[in-house]
Amino acid sequence: MSSTPMLPPRPPIDFDTPVMRFHRSRRKVTNIVVSGLAILATVIVIAPLVAILVYLLYKGASSLNFNFFTKIPAPVGEEGGGMANSIVGSGIILVLASLMGIPIGIAAGVYLSEFGRGKFLANAIRFTADVLNGVPSIVMGIAIYSLIVMRQKHFSAFAGGVALAIMMVPTITRTTEEMLSTVPHAIREAALGLGVPKWRTVLSVSLRTASPGIITGCMLAFARVAGETAPLLFTAFGNQFWSVKLNEPIGALPLQIYVYAISPYDEWHRLAWAGSLVLIVMIMVSVTLVRVFASRGALKGGN
Amino acid sequence: MSRAEDHSTTLDRMTADHNVNSDSSTPPALIVSHFVQEPAPGTPQAPPPEPSEIRRFLSQRGSGAFADNSFAGVILLCACSIFAIVIFIAAILIKSSHLSIAQFGLKFFSTSDWDPVSGQFGALPFIFGTLATSFLALLIAVPLALGVAVFISELCPRPLRAPISFLTELLAAIPSVVYGLWAVFVLVPLMRDQLGPFLVKYFGWTHLFEGANFGVGLLTAGIILAIMILPIISSITRDIMLSVPNHQREAVLALGATRWEMIRTGVLRNARIGIVGAVILGLGRALGETMAVTMVIGNHAEIAHSLFAPGNTLASVIANEFSEATGDLYLSSLIEIGLALFLVTIIVNAIARLLVWAVTRGAPARVS
């Protein structure tokens, strides 16, 4: 005998009124339309990349020859010529930049990950590195111009190297920090537990374990600055002749592409395409390597 | 949802790692010193007649404090050099532009005469050019980037996801000068012969597309900028959307939402601050982009109301005129433009980073 009266059975909700049907089909259509738009957007974004790459391959490959890698630029009006001096010059500037930028970048990354974790200073440095990463490259160029070129009274390969080094530091710092933070903490504890001093732990345990990731991070930074033109305009300046001296203006591949691209001569345009192809292939190879290492590096499954 | 589980376990593992890292960075060292100072707890009464092998080894070796401290010092110095670089760039730019700052003051940014011959310098046309091209670029790039990010993070079949994000990252790796080269030989003729007449025919009533169309100009610069900032915005937006916890998606889907309703209410609404951050980050890149813009913008210091008109941006005027600047005032005016660019991009980037951090930093905590 229950005191609660039985509720009358509720009539089933009618899901099939015209209004309901209208709303349901409207929602379905919106869903399909938006999915379609997203796919369309992806296609529109991928299209220019494919267009640029195909055009570049077509133009570059048809004008690339052996002379490109062995000859220096020919005077206006003459056929032939190459960018040998610019390729070597780019190499010299990049080696200089790496020598300066990579140690500082890695050290700063080590500080962020191993010494300053959670400290205010470390957060401030991480933030500054991110902000520095967004500073336009041309600003680096005029800052180094004011600092080195104005004092020395001449353009130099060294100044170009310094400008690129400054651009490498924030990228390397952040990737090093990220790679170090994937190193399992147990490995560090094991080393410290054996009485290994902290500096030794950092150098031969943490950095060693994270080295594939750090090396690829450095290559990524290297690839990024390899294509930079703006900071070199007023520092390395470019050179039409052979020069390997650090104290003199030196040619660089991106600079030479820029000069040739805005010139009115067809022969120079041809060389600009060839130079772009060489530059892109170099950068893409290193980016792909980074991708491969990052997806199946030695760190995966380290726990 | 195997993808969802996979994602959340990765996040869990990351969180665990972070916790371990942040909690126990010093204790191991403390334990060692503790051990050295006190006798072993197992044998408190026994007199220690002979120091053990390990103890002797340790005491002979010294504490290593000097090496540790100097290593930490060197590392700290390198880390602080990042501060030094920023401060130092600001200082050197201010010092080199003092001539122009003293001469023109704030009027430098509000007058539009740029006449090196008579020594009149006003940066207003370049500020206008920078703002116009960046705004155009955002207008084109943001909807597309959002579409790509939604597609990659929510709709894309799993096997396609890696290649597409790889392609968009490749787009980011192409150097600016190569984009410029492509723009000069492909985009400019396209603009001059097809796109330009089309715009005049159908959108001529807006008065935005007037005057002679040479193919170079604000609109072309805006389009190439859009292509260049797309990968940045879309990859950061994708990361932010992936950091939205999966139970948000599941909860909305469980209420009977369609996929788009799930994306709108479950994902986009949660990620909106981070998406704004990503857009501002793209804006920062667009403001400072130099080479590609210099090659297609036409280089003309004038404020025009037509999008076909050639213009100049802060960065492109430096690239064009710096090496041929004669006279100290001319040079120092160009450096002052660089200083303005530096300060603006620092502010823009700082805001963007804070917004992105506000979202991605809280994400692992919410999962656990």
Image: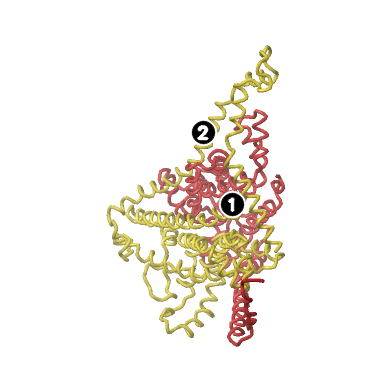
The residue closer to the viewer here, A231 or A166, is A166
Position of residue A190 measured from the top left corner of the image (x, y, whole percent): 68, 34
Query: Looking at the image, is mark 1 or mark 2 nearer the viewer?
Result: 2
| Colour basis | by chain
Colour assignment, chain A: red
Image quadrant of residue B125?
Answer: bottom left
For the point 44% across and 44% down, the residue is A148
- Amino acid on which disc 2 is placed: Gly
Q: Which residue is mark 2?
A: B73
Give how far across and how far down residue B185 sits, in percent. 56, 70
Q: Which quarter of the rendering shows the N terminus of chain B? A: bottom right
Q: Name which residue type carries label 1.
A: Asn
Q: Callout 1: residue from which chain?
A: A
Q: Residues within 10 Å of mark 1 (few under 14, many from 20)?
A: many
Q: Quadrant of residue B123?
A: bottom left
Q: Vertically, is A301 above or below A38?
A: above
For this view, does A68 lie left or right of residue A159? right
Asked if A193 appears above or below A183 in the picture, the reply is above
Question: From what the image shows, is residue A99 above or below residue B69?
Answer: below
Q: Which residue is mark 1?
A: A85
